Image (cartoon, grey):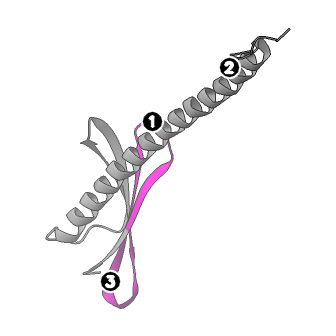
Amino acid sequence: MRRPIEQGFTLIELLVALAVFSLVVLALLNLAGENTRTAQLLEARTLAAMVAENAAIDALIAPEPPALGETEGQVQLGDQAWIWRRTTSPADQGLLRIEIRVQGWDGPQTLAEVTVFRGGA
């Protein structure tokens, strides 16, 4: 007597395939979450760099050079509040070194930093 040809998968094979599939889905979800966090950080750093560059340009084009020492200000950009700190110190040959650091409103971490030099010390 002939045995019928078996077709399909056994229950164990289906359970193993389902377990492998679920591991792949979990890895992809983790990757998507990581991509979202990275995109948010990149957006914050890009906006902070714009704030730092704007503050540097303001210091460079002002009629009078900025006063020596530290100055702090706030600016609104991209529906967020940013805090910038400008430190002005003398440099060689009559130049001023102007360092600008920008942080978000919600934390002390510096997200962008720009250093420029200006004459007029």
Magenta region: which residues? Answer: 88-114
- Mark 2 — residue? 18
Q: Position of residue 18 (x, y in %)?
A: 68, 20
- Mark 1 — residue? 106
Check disc 1 and report its element: helix, strand or loop. loop
User: In percent of the image, x 23 and y 72: which residue is there?
Assistant: 65
Quarter occupied by residue 55: bottom left
User: In percent of the image, x 71 and y 17: which residue is there?
Assistant: 9
Three-letter amino acid code of the residue under disc 3? Leu
Check disc 3 and report its element: helix, strand or loop. strand
Mark 3 Cα within 10 Å, few/some/many (few <14, many 20+)? some
Q: Is residue 36 left or right of residue 86?
A: right
Quarter occupied by residue 96: bottom left
Does the residue at mark 1 contact the one at mark 2 (Cβ under 8 Å)? no
Tell me the CA gap for discs 3 and 1.
34 Å
Asked whether 14 or 35 is in front, the reply is 14
Mark 2 Cα within 10 Å, few/some/many (few <14, many 20+)? few
Q: Is residue 29 left or right of residue 49?
A: right
Which comes sooner in the sequence, label 1 or label 2? 2
User: In percent of the image, x 37 and y 45: which residue is there?
Assistant: 43
- Mark 3 — residue? 95
Residue 74 on the magenta segment: no
Check disc 2 and report its element: helix, strand or loop. helix
Tell me the CA gap for discs 2 and 3.
68 Å
Q: Residue furthest right?
A: 1
Which comes sooner in the sequence, label 2 or label 3? 2
Asked whether 100 or 96 is in front, the reply is 100
